[in-house]
Image (cartoon, helix red, strand yellow):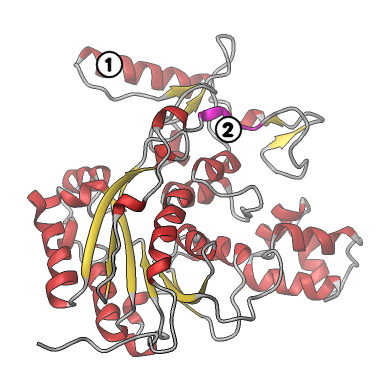
Amino acid sequence: MDTYELIDLALQRFSPKEVAQALGVDPKTVRRWHVRETEPKPYIADAIRQRLLPIGEPPTDAGAFTFIDLFAGIGGIRTGFEKQGGRCVFTSEWDPYARKTYAANFHDGPGHVFAEDITKVDEADVPDHDVLLAGFPCQPFSIAGVSKKNALGRPHGFSDKTQGTLFFDVARIIEAKRPRAFLLENVKNLMSHDKGRTFSTIIDVLQNELGYKVWHKVINGKHFGPQHRERIIIVGFRDEVPFSWDDLELPDFGISPKMGSVLHRQDGSEPAEWPSIGGDKGKVLDKYTLSDKLWDYLQNYAAKHREKGNGFGFGLVNSESTCRTLSARYYKDGSEILISQGAKKNPRRLTPRECARLMGFEDTFRIPVSDTRAYKQFGNSVVVPVISEVARIMVPHLIKDDKAPTSGKKKKG
């Protein structure tokens, strides 16, 4: 492709403003390139390939196994299964900004389908697959989500008609396509929501209605990185297999990385084009440092709740710390994870690249959206190494032989 063709391709996936932000130019400049009014400089072609388009070429082989990626977000679950040799044949994600990040990071070969609203997809139109992956929305079941909805007088759990019932879209696809296995991910609070009735319903559907053998386990992302993040993983297999959680290899908390492993090095060794850093040494930009007004507010808020005996307040960490759970609301004030910059300077927020590292994404992962959108996306993501490890112990039970169909009919009786 020549430079103009690359610009056209980028504009099929992103707005002129987003392309301009990634390339460090004005949106009007991008529009002039698009209509061939002006000629872009030679470096623009490489910049588009490096910052807005997936690395490498689309897959051409069938993969060791196939999977579908439901409620895909930015592809954290997919990443873990691709590393084990799987090939994605269907993706569903309703959020347009998450789709942009997804498209910037994953090649989808021939036959791949990208759907938006899974509730509008007929299960018969979903391709056959070996594994169904779904990080179905957690807000109806999370502690923060339930508290907020209670305060607003809104329903939660399965009573939330917009999000809580999306599990049943997962179930209808499993019933129709009969994949060899599935992996579902959600917040730990799913187990205790509605006095355990919500989780009991989910397991009952998977085991008794759909006929799968089911295992579940709460895994803390702290095993692999400097973040306390507990999530429940539900694994199911259609056929009898010797799957066991005992095969997991989870590093001890005592040897897991600390915050220093995700923070910008600020020594000039990181890519100069990253938008969160600047100068010869790649110092974190001042815009991430809290204003005096916000820092005073957070300190006063914490002090007020300490007097009441509550634990509410900000989470201040340094390079030797482990942080709290990164949430989708991080863009508001960053209070759950603030990076100390010493006694003479206000703390700062994490940058989007540091959030990506905190969730286990590699530095090659592209972030083509605004900081606000990026914070939401990483706050909603999975810890990639957790999924990779679960995928590792699932895959030996998935590899097809000549007699094993990709999908099968439910056994009767």
Instruction: Label 2: state its secondary structure.
Output: helix
- Judge whether 46 appears above or below 211 on screen: above
The residue labelled by disc 1 is 304
Q: Residues within 10 Å of mark 1 (few under 14, many from 20)?
A: some
- Which image quadrant for residue 117? bottom left
Q: Residues within 10 Å of mark 2 (few under 14, many from 20)?
A: some
Q: Is residue 342 visible?
A: yes
User: How far is mark 2 from mark 1, CA to CA?
Assistant: 33 Å
Q: Residue at x 19, y 16 (%)?
A: 308
- Specify the quadrant that holds the C terminus: bottom left
Q: Is residue 326 visible?
A: no
Instruction: Label 1: state its secondary structure.
Output: helix
Q: Residue at x 31, y 62 (%)?
A: 184
- Judge whether 259 appears above or below 168 on screen: above
Instruction: Look at label 2 and name its amino acid.
Output: Ser
Instruction: Look at label 1 and name its amino acid.
Output: Lys
- Specify the quadrant that holds the N terminus: bottom right
The residue labelled by disc 2 is 261
Specify which label sits upstream in the sequence, 2 or 1: 2
Is residue 198 left or right of 254 when viewed as pictured?
Answer: left
Extent of the magenta region: 258-264
- Judge whether 335 appears above or below 144 on screen: above
Q: Nearer the viewer, residue 66 or 314?
A: 66
Q: Residue at x 40, y 22 (%)?
A: 298
Q: Residue at x 58, y 50 (%)?
A: 370
Residue 261 is one of the magenta-drawn residues: yes
Q: Position of residue 43 (x, y in %)?
A: 88, 58
